[in-house]
Amino acid sequence: APGTSTATNPVAMKTIFRDTLFTNVAKTADGGVYWEGLEKEVDGSEGVVDWHGDPWTPGSGMPSSHPNSRFCAPAVNCPIIDPQWESPEGVPISAILFGGRRPLGVPLVYEALSWRHGVLIGAAMRSESTAAAEHKAKVIMHDPFEMRF
């Protein structure tokens, strides 16, 4: 969640507007949620509780939310989901995207030469560990099909 806002990911912000589970984010006195980078800045008078359950203010020197806090919402909330997403016949697939964490040395996007080549590329992927990983950050690990979090 940290850094997610209407400016950085407007579709996600519309998706999480209702029926959403938030983990390791701050809670505001009015029942809302807060994390660093959200549009709304809070002040100390709003009664914010951090992800540890302790009172929090912007001047506390500590983040309000865990660096790997998350949210989970039903797919039906997504405003750009394909209208046929629940069709028993399925929807046509013209591409499969794998999104990993490789800030250096790997192109942001590249295309496989065929579906078989895509499976090979996906199986051979590696990514950098995250703040939530059991390993230290910046460690490059085997991550087939970018399935690690």
Image (cartoon, rainbow, N blue to C red):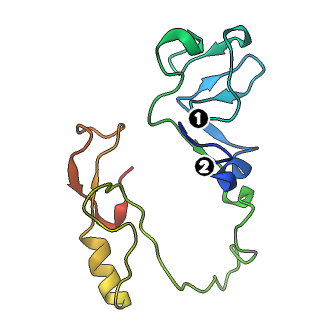
- Quadrant position of residue 100: bottom left
Q: Secondary structure at mark 2?
A: loop
Q: Is residue 13 above or below residue 116?
A: above
Tell whether label 2 touches label 1 (CB within 8 Å). Answer: yes
Judge whether residue 102 can be spotted in this image. yes
Please give left or right for residue 146 compared with residue 134 in the image. Answer: right
Residue 110 or residue 127, whichever sits in front: 110
The amino acid marked with disc number 1 is Gly
- Residue at which label 1 appears: 37
Q: Secondary structure at mark 1?
A: loop
Residue 73 horizontal/vertical position (percent): 65, 49
**How many numbered callouts?**
2
**Residue occupied by mark 2:** 8
Viewer can see residue 54: no
| Residue displayed at 53% across by 36% down | 2
User: Quick one: label 1, few (<14), some, or many (20+) residues within 10 Å?
Assistant: some
Q: Is residue 95 above or below residue 19?
A: below
Kindly identify the amino acid type of the residue bearing the numbered disc 2.
Answer: Thr
Rendering coords of residue 81 (x, y %): 70, 68
Residue 128, image x and y in percent?
28, 51
Residue furthest toward the bottom?
114
Identify the image quadrant of residue 5.
top right
